[in-house]
Image (cartoon, grey):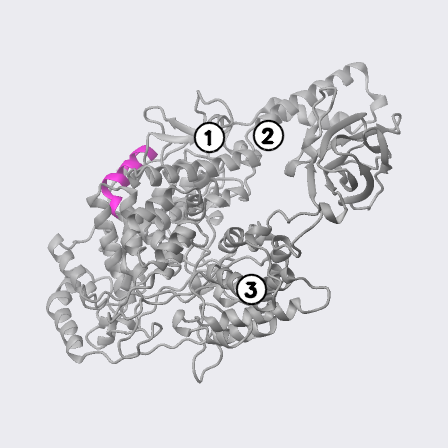
Amino acid sequence: MNYQIGKRVANGASQKEAPIGSRDQRLTCLDQRIICPASVLSVVTGCILGVIAVFPAVAGAEDRVEEQFRERIQPILNEYCISCHEDGSESGGLVLNEFTSNLARIRDGKLWWAVLRNVRAGLMPPLDNPRPTDTELRVLEDWIKHGPFAFDPENSKTRRAPMHRLNQVEYRNTIYELMGVDYDTKGEFPPDDSGYGFDNIAEVLTLSPLLMEKYFVAAKSIVTQAVPTASEVVVETKIAGQRFHSPNGVDLKKESHGAISLSYYQPALATSTFHAEHPGRYQLVLDLTPREMEAFGRDSNQCRVRFKVDGQELFQRDFSRHENVPFHHQFYQLELDLSAGEHELAFTLEPLTPDEKQLRNLEIRINSVVVRGPLERQFWARPANYSRFFPSDVPEEDSERRLYSRDLLHAFAKKAFRRPVDDMTVNRLVELAERESSLEGVTFEVGIAQAMAAVLVSPRFLLREEETEKGSSDQVPLVDEYALASWLSYVLWSSMPDDELFRLAEEHALRKNLPAQMKRMLADPRSREFIRNFVGQWLRARDIKTVPINAFAVIHRDQPSDFDAIRSRMRWQELGRRFSDTHSEDEKQELNEARASYFKSFRRFHDQELNGELRMSMNRETEMLFDHIIHQDRSLRDLLISDYTFLDARLAKHYGIDGVEGPEMRRVSLPANSPRGGVLTQGTVLAVTSNPDRTSPVKRGLFILSNILGIPPQPPPPNTDPLEEAAKEFANRTPTLRETLEMHRKKPECKSCHDRMDPLGLALENFNALGQWREREQGETVDSTGRLITGEAFVNIQELKRILVDHHSRDFFRCLSEKMLTYALGRGLDFRDVETLDSLVDRIERENGRASALVYGIIESPQFQRYQYSSAGNAPNQIDRSPADSAQPLEPRKSP
């Protein structure tokens, strides 16, 4: 069986993936059963079925929609649309003159949503055709929203997503807040699917048997790391490798995670100190890792490592590298008696083979020394985090201990489930803890830890539950304040609510304090998660870390060939094919000069390579711009055009911007008429929308249409020839990309989409695939002029950005609103969300583009605040459908 979140099993049909309903599914089996591996699977199974009640439409409403269509809309369609969209033409796959015989399509919300988007964007009718007046457009828009979309301002319908499973980021952050453990979800869990461009979409966050198994393993590992298993333990002090220093002032090589490394080939001394509070028997654990940094043949060098305490040698071992023997952590346990006070710890390394060739880079990594003691029982103490899970002493009496267990587990489950917990669930958890701790040799703490592990595999923890406000008689009731607290925290922090949100929800005061809480949450460092996860996916900024770009191929395409370097390389290869003892003195000198000339030429490519440091700076530039706009409440238009950006010295050099020194990312004012400014000319966007060896105007144009203007074209027709086929038409030379695209657009099946994409992408051709400015491509001057399908002409990227701001800012606001609302709700949007999107865009424009208008508008929207259900069914999962509700939302696009 496959446990799916976001799919529905249809009655009487073959099994299909289907959504778990929301809180209305009531995880009653959680109240009936103890939460343990066997029963959790039963719980999840019982949560999969959803119920959708479809109610008959009111005949009078249908008649009015049809009447208005015939009287007001049909004339507009006949005047401006039917000539292209009549039976037999099927332009864009849409036939409009069949409505008189198929009235059901008049109420097809999905179809009319596509019509509305294209008309608003100015794409339809085509620019050279007669176009409706503003009045006619308002009539069409009004009819679509109140007819097919059935918008009712007195009873705004919303569509909640199925119950959300925590994705990898949310799980990791929640576990850290709840348990204090930074669990590696990326390494331990299978990757999350993405839908609609985001990885927090409920419909694709499935819960498979494999993932459920991983959750069991994770719960056990997390609880083992976090929860103490005894009230007293031997005191332990960890001395990280970087706390060791050279007494001679020699710098030791520092590594990640607090380690240092000593070379096999150089004598070394590293010392630190340890203060013993009490005299007694101590245990020391040395954590060492022999390793190699390069592999060029077998290296027979050896070294000897000694470890001393106060000059007394306790450890000695010789190390050497043998082929096919993997390196790993090696632990060495030592014991000795120590007096109270300071003690010197010292590592020495002595090379044993000074005459051997160094063919590798062999090192001994000192990770840490752990000192445990005194080992005598009277010196034991509480574990470091004991009070986090056990705030007071464990009672001796059984009855008092049971009450104590109940208090602990009730508080823990309430926090983990992010809402109050019923008595039956707490009782089951207490019974599990008591049954475990009653076994011989098992402590009270171990029993509590086992019950906590059960909580971490409960659907109430893994899924984000919802309830509606109790006693509400509204047809579209508000979600309760615990659900609101969770929605807020997972949108803005990608984590669970904090104590302040819990307190306000418990007092039923969160909703009336919402503006203040949003301001507090955005000011909290945890809001960086919203910036990182939303921007990283909307603008694909996080893809910059892995996108393949070949700097050599990119620069070679842009710059004229260096014939001296080519001759040097050929001469170097020619001389290198001969044995060195046959070279004359002149040839030896020539070989050295040729080698030096070649490497000097090659370094120009190496210096511009997108290394890890530069990629990270690009990612930070994009994140910091969005962060600045959100936290400074600046205009969202700054995302399109701005006179500033965020740079460090390395990224500024890459962009060719002078006057930036140092590794710190900071705001930098751009020179007048700079092509930079805004996200479109940032290295992240330019690189992730390129091919590995060259730019891609098609990818860049598609990115702008999909992520900036919100009008993505249809997928290409099947069996379409690749772009490279058009380049073969140029027999005597390599064409520029503009010439290739012009040839490609001559094909009728390619023209309509490329007319939208290509001008936008070609406007960015002055930026190569590395994100650097260039003037020439394939020896020809780059031509970045163009004309949008809506008619505006431009000569460069600066003018295009100004056109987008001056003439298409409303399209941008709507697109950004769609993206952020999708991210916030965790579901795709459909026609029922159009009125909310329009309200968001109106609010943004009224407030001069301020970021707060969008963020606050989403949180205050009915989609975020309310939960639609049928008044007849009295259950949140029963969706009251109007005639227009027959259309389904657009299908989510999963990641490959």
Residue at image mark 1: 665
Residue 877 lies within the magenta run: no
Magenta residues? Answer: 794-810
User: Is residue 79 at least partly visible in the picture?
Assistant: yes
Q: Residues within 10 Å of mark 1 (few under 14, many from 20)?
A: some
The residue under label 3 is which amino acid type? Answer: Ser
Which is nearer the N-term, disc 2 or disc 1? 2
Q: How many residues crowd around disc 3 within 10 Å: few (fewer than 14), some, or many (20 or more)?
A: many
Q: Is most of the magenta stretch helix, strand or loop?
A: helix
Q: Nearer the viewer, mark 2 or mark 3?
A: 3
Distance in Å between CA atoms under marks 1 and 3: 50 Å
Helix or strand or loop: what does disc 1 sit on? loop
Q: Position of residue 856 (x, y in %)?
A: 29, 49
Q: Are marks 2 and 1 in contact (CB under 8 Å)?
A: no
* Side (left or right) of 435 relative to 784: right
Q: Is residue 476 above or below residue 749?
A: below
Instruction: Give the residue drawn at x 46%, y 35%.
Output: 771
Which of pointers 1 and 3 lies earlier in the amino acid sequence? 3
* Residue closest to the eye, 160 or 178: 178
Judge from the rendering whether residue 482 lies leftward or rightward of residue 571; answer left or right. left
Circle 2 residue? 606
Q: Amino acid at mark 1?
A: Met
Q: Earlier in the sequence, mark 2 or mark 3?
A: 3
Q: Label 3's element? A: helix
Quick check: marks 1 and 3 in contact, CB under 8 Å?
A: no
Reading the image, the residue beneath label 3 is: 405
Q: Quadrant of residue 164?
A: bottom left
Q: Position of residue 799 (x, y in %)?
A: 29, 34
Crowd around label 2: few <14 · some 14–19 · many ≥20 (10 Å): few
- Disc 2 marks which amino acid? His
